[in-house]
Image (cartoon, grey):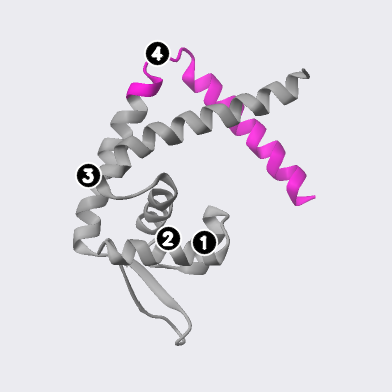
Amino acid sequence: MEQSQRFFDLILDVRRLYVEDMNKVLTKHQLSSAQWLVFKEIAKQQPTTLVEVARSRRIEKPTATKVIRRLIELNLIETSEGKDKREKILTLTTAGSEHYTTMLHEVIQKQTEILADVEQLDLVTNELSTIYQHLQKGKDE
């Protein structure tokens, strides 16, 4: 098998295992890893909009809409009118802010446990960042 194919297969396998571990943490908060990523994006960028969240998470708007509806049902985020009636501004509710802090702590703790024994994590992270930049550059061309 080519080196590059093995690399991408490993990336996908690492992602799958990571998502499984994160879902164990997140399910007790009634969220999936995909919902968590949208929730985290809103928390980081608030006030924000569905379009901005979809763009930054690189997901389709209908997918973002479905996730956002679920976050509203859980009283984690709220919407308000934007510049026109079609635009909805997304922010965390008070309960959502508290929940976010708790969940972030739990996720970071789990990530730390997972990566505790990885030697040269900084080097691996820097190399993956470089690979990501190359992939992004190739996509933009």
Amino acid, disc 2: Val
Relative image position of residue 93 (x, y in whole percent): 24, 65
Report the quarter where the N terminus lies.
Answer: top right
Tags 4 and 2 touching, CB below 8 Å: no
Tags 2 and 1 touching, CB below 8 Å: yes
Q: Which residue is mark 1?
A: 63
Amino acid, disc 3: Thr
- At 69% across and 44% down in the image, what residue appears? 136
Looking at the image, is mark 1 or mark 3 nearer the viewer? 1
* Label disc, if present, on residue 109 of the rendered structure: none
SS under mark 3: helix
Residue 127, located in which quarter of the rendered image? top right
- At 41% across and 45% down in the image, what residue appears? 33
Q: Which residue is mark 2?
A: 67
Relative image position of residue 17 (x, y in whole percent): 47, 29
In terms of depth relative to the viewer, which is nearer, 73 or 78? 73
Badge 2: how crowded within 10 Å, few (<14), some, or many (20+)?
Answer: many
Mark 1 or 3 closer to N-term?
1
Amino acid, disc 1: Thr
Q: Which residue is mark 4?
A: 117
Residue farthest toward the bottom in the current orientation of the protein: 85
Q: Which residue is mark 3?
A: 102
Left or right: 137, with 38 as reference point: right
Calculate the distance from the C-alpha at mark 4 to the C-alpha at mark 3.
25 Å
Tags 1 and 4 touching, CB below 8 Å: no
Numbered range of the magenta stretch: 113-141
In terms of depth relative to the viewer, which is nearer, 131 or 66? 66
Left or right: 138, with 90 as reference point: right
Calculate the distance from the C-alpha at mark 3 to the C-alpha at mark 2.
20 Å
**The magenta stretch spans residue 124:** yes
